[in-house]
Amino acid sequence: MKVSKKSEYGARALVEIAMRSRNGEDWHQIAQIAEASRIPEKFLEQILLVLKNGGVLKSRRGVDGGYALNELPENIRLDRVVGLLDGNPVGNAKKSRAGDAADAGARIYHELIQRAQEAALTVLRQVSLNDLVEQVRKQRVVTGESLEYQI
């Protein structure tokens, strides 16, 4: 299963947006997200556009505009995010014709890779954006990295 920097950055940006959001109408500008999550702004623009086109985010133009979650964080699964940004990893293993022992070995290898990809996808299906946000919050409390203040 190929998971690129694009997927990692997409997940990090979504976590940042979710952590900053109090409700579905909180708008976050690309520059703010890029700075907070340490993602190159130009690359982040491309990622957020893909996530918007995939229905994960919504956007609004203007001074008060930016990006916001289009769904509740608990409804956004990581398999969807990775699928949007990296494509569907399952089903990409090459099929080999049954024949001699070498072909059988190749077929068995590709079937094994297919099973591994499906197992990875199953794990990603079980993790929501909300799960990631909770893990990040716990980690930040443990490390004292970032405290949230409300006035």
Image (cartoon, rainbow, N blue to C red):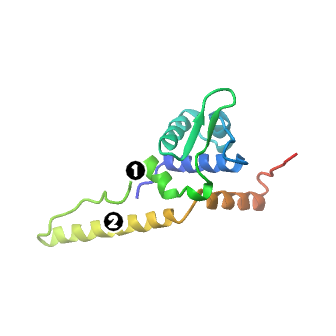
> Relative to 3, does residue 107 appear above or below in the rendering?
below
Residue, far right: 151
Quarter holding the C terminus?
top right
- Looking at the rendered structure, the secondary structure element under dot 2 is helix
Disc marking residue 114: 2
- The answer, for residue 40, to whether it is visible in the render is no
- Looking at the rendered structure, the secondary structure element under dot 1 is loop
Q: Where is residue 62 shown, x and y percent of the image?
A: 64, 26
Q: Residue at x 61, y 53 (%)?
A: 72
- Give the CA separation, mark 1 to mark 2: 15 Å
> Relative to 74, does residue 28 appear above or below in the rendering?
above
Q: Which amino acid does the dot numbered 1 rest on?
A: Gly
Quarter holding the N terminus?
bottom left
Q: Residue at x 53, y 58 (%)?
A: 77
Residue, far left: 99
Residue marked by disc 1: 87
Identify which residue, 90 or 96, lies in the foreground.
90
- The answer, for residue 140, to whether it is visible in the render is yes
Disc marking residue 12: none
Q: Where is residue 83 shown, x and y percent of the image?
A: 44, 52
Image side of residue 91 versus residue 119, left or right:
left
Question: How many numbered marks does the figure carry?
Answer: 2
Q: Which amino acid does the dot numbered 2 rest on?
A: Gln
Q: Earlier in the sequence, mark 1 or mark 2?
A: 1
Q: Where is residue 14 shown, x and y percent of the image?
A: 60, 48
Q: Residue at x 42, y 68 (%)?
A: 119
Image side of residue 22 versus residue 78, left or right:
right
Identify which residue, 77 or 141, lies in the foreground.
77
> Relative to 98, does residue 28 appear above or below in the rendering?
above
Identify which residue, 84 or 4, lies in the foreground.
84
Q: Where is residue 7 shown, x and y percent of the image?
A: 50, 49
